Amino acid sequence: MKHFLLKSALVAAMAVSITACGGLEQIFAIKDQQITSVKSQAPLEQRYTAFGSFTPFSAKFDANNDKLGYFTVYYPQTGGNFPLIVMANGSGTKSSSYEAVFRHLASYGFVVIGSQEESSWTG
């Protein structure tokens, strides 16, 4: 009985930890204000902490894969050919934590693709 209670407590603690990690991911997600509120006297930093001249849009696409979840593509509103950035995160953090960064890059004329994949760091 003692071992059963110990195992039950351990399983419950693990479940709470896993649930808390999802909340922490949102707490530590980068926000637009964190990018645009950087104060610097350097002209280059002053220029690029502000949003660019393109209006960023995004669209979600089902990845048809349980591990990948979905892809989100951030892109400039105007059509045209733009350089592509693919988020291949090796830390196990979903790309949705970087939405502000992706929007910022799209405002400068980049197309950015990220997935909700969390296991690339496992090798």
Image (spheres, grey):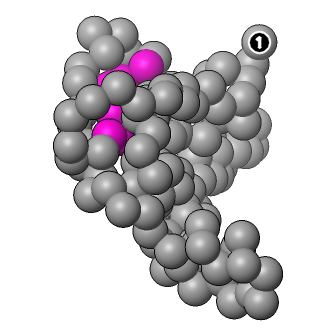
Left or right: 23 as drawn, with respect to 58: right
Q: In the rendered structure, does residue 83 fall within the stretch colored magenta?
A: no
Other-residue count near label 1 (Cα within 10 Å), few / some / many at <14 / 14–19 / ≥20: few
The image shows residue 106 at horizontal and vertical percentages of 41, 48
Name the quarter where the N terminus is drawn.
Answer: top right
* Residue in the image at 52% along x and 39% along y: 94
> Quarter-wise, where is residue 3 in the image?
top right
Front one among 62 and 34: 34
Residue 97 visible in the picture: no
Residue 39 point in image, percent of width and height: 69, 89
Could you tell whether 76 is left or right of 109 in the image?
left
Q: Nearer the viewer, residue 11 or 99?
A: 99
Per the rendered image, the range of residues in magenta is 68-75
Residue carrying label 1: 123
> Looking at the picture, does residue 109 appear above or below residue 112?
below
63 up-or-down from 43: above or below: above
Instruction: Check disc 1 and report its element: helix, strand or loop.
Output: loop
Q: Residue at x 32, y 40 (%)?
A: 75
By secondary structure, the bulk of the magenta-drawn segment is best described as strand
Q: Amino acid at mark 1?
A: Gly
Coordinates of residue 50 in the picture (x, y in percent) = 51, 74
Q: Is residue 104 left or right of residue 20?
A: left
- Quarter of the rendering containing residue 109: top left
